[in-house]
Image: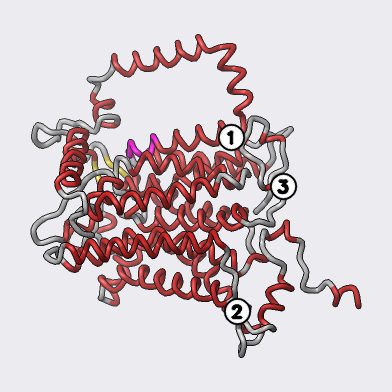
Amino acid sequence: MQLLRKYRFTLPRRHTGLAPVSNVKAGLDSGSGAGMTEAGSGYLRRIPYYSALALLVYMPFHVFLSQSLSLLTGGLEYWKIGKDLLLALATLFAICLVFWQRRAERWYMVLVGFIVVYAAIHAVVWLGNPGIYAQSAALGSVYNVRLFCYAILGASSVVLWPKVFVFRTIFIIITGVASVIALLGILQYLLPKDTLTHVGYSLDRGVRPAFFIDDNPAFPRIMSTLRDPNSLGAYLIVPFTALSSWLLRVRPRPSSRQLIVLGLWLLHLTAIYLTFSRSAWLAAMVALAGVLWWQFSSQFVRVARRYWPIVVGVVVLAAGGLFAVRHNALVDGVLTHSTEAQVGNVDSNEYHWLYVRRGIDGIMQKPLGHGPGTAGIVSIHNPGGGLLTENYYVQIGYEVGVVGVAIFIAGTVWIYLRLMRRGDQWGAILLSSFWAYVITNMLLHIWSNEAVAAQWWILAGMALVAATSTTTDSSSRRTLGPNQRKKKVSPA
């Protein structure tokens, strides 16, 4: 019993990546957190963790719940802003608690610094353009800045309550939620296309009840409980990547667990396909390639050196086959999104490049920014009309100028480099999906979607803790290399 009392508050640092709980208790006794009992402090430390989990579970259902429940309660706008208000309060509370308990390491202060500077840039550019529509400016600022808020909330949740955090558990939760979303999407493909009109979906209420390629009923697209098919496809990328990673782990013989993972992987793959979102298809291929490279890079190098003529031949034959059937109605509809129902002489692909060029021209004309809310999806509320740049990075440059987009890119690169320090399976999943989202954001405003943004940025924030801690053991610091799948993988 004396030994138990002696080591009661001591945990091995390699399990948490943080200071032992005894140090935290000593800090509380020495004056940090004076006036608060240890039990009360423990309950407060759980709030950011449960807030992060609540956002991960709720966000993919937000559009469906807000549209349907507001029919009963009214106040659709309050339902829309409620999630962002919760995020703001939880983030502010988490930051204050981390600093109050003296757990803010240098990397954490850098992350907080990014959000402060990024928010300040939005305020300065807004003041420099006083004539912009205030409602769109406020909404645009929230949509842009909340990305770093998600990351800070995720990081704070692990810093404050490290004992309970296990990455495997978090990924099981998001994969379970995403599987429900994918299943509902597939059911939507089979149900009548006006089904969602009965639960509050309409253009007048801000959400389309159904999507088709070029509005052609012969080419329906699913969106499940998210806002649109592109958002659904992007949301499924992280769980699809996680399932791919689990599925590719080599075992002597298949187990029942692997069969379940295979079934869920096929479910997600089917849902991604039925979105008919080319950006989601491309993102899924990029993420899958990243996971394959992480686990089998040495084998790929050997095969490429020995059989590269065959690989080149297969690629050439596939490209030639697609070129030969380029005028097929199915190929035109699915791959190029050009159907007989197309209106006008400009198809979907030409509109993408047209909007991007308009955004770049706007940046060149006003490099200091036109003001938050002047581009992107929130700009459609502007009385004078908005600008869809079809590229998230161009949107940020148009809104807050060259300086603003530089700060955003610097923040994302900093997070990426920190995630590379993990060197484990969970880091590989986030890094692979990162490049998938780089691709989608060059084609869409995908970070503006709350479900997609919350999922990746909260997980990235959680992963930063072990990736940046000075006490992380050598097994979790290993770099990505060709023989990684033979090495021990840390669960957190």
Distance of label 1 from label 3 (alpha carbons): 19 Å
* Residue most extreme to the bottom: 35
* 266 with respect to 446 (left or right): right
Which range is magenta?
Answer: 276-282
Task: Point out the tag, 2 or 3, that comes first from the N-terminus.
Answer: 2
Q: Residue 443, which numbered label?
A: none
In the image, what residue occupies the spot 32% across and 67% down? 66
When the figure is inspected, residue 282 is found, relative to residue 329, above or below; the finding is below
- In the image, is residue 141 part of the stretch drawn in magenta? no
Q: Residue at x 72, y 51 (%)?
A: 473
Residue 254 or residue 160, whichever sits in front: 160
Q: Is residue 135 above or below residue 2?
A: above
Which residue is under mark 3?
A: 474
Q: Amino acid at mark 3?
A: Ser
Mark 1 or mark 3: name the one nearer the start of the chain: 1
Which structural element holds mark 2? helix
Left or right of residue 278, residue 26 in this image: right
Discs 1, 3 touching: Cβ within 8 Å? no
Q: Earlier in the sequence, mark 1 or mark 2?
A: 2
What type is the residue that disc 2 sits on? Tyr
Disc 2/disc 3 C-alpha distance (Å) = 32 Å
Q: Which mark is residue 294?
A: 1
Quadrant the C terminus occupies: bottom right
On the image, numbered disc 2 is attached to which residue?
43
The disc labelled 1 sits on which kind of residue? Trp
The quarter in which the N terminus is drawn is bottom right
Separation (CA) of disc 1 from disc 2: 39 Å
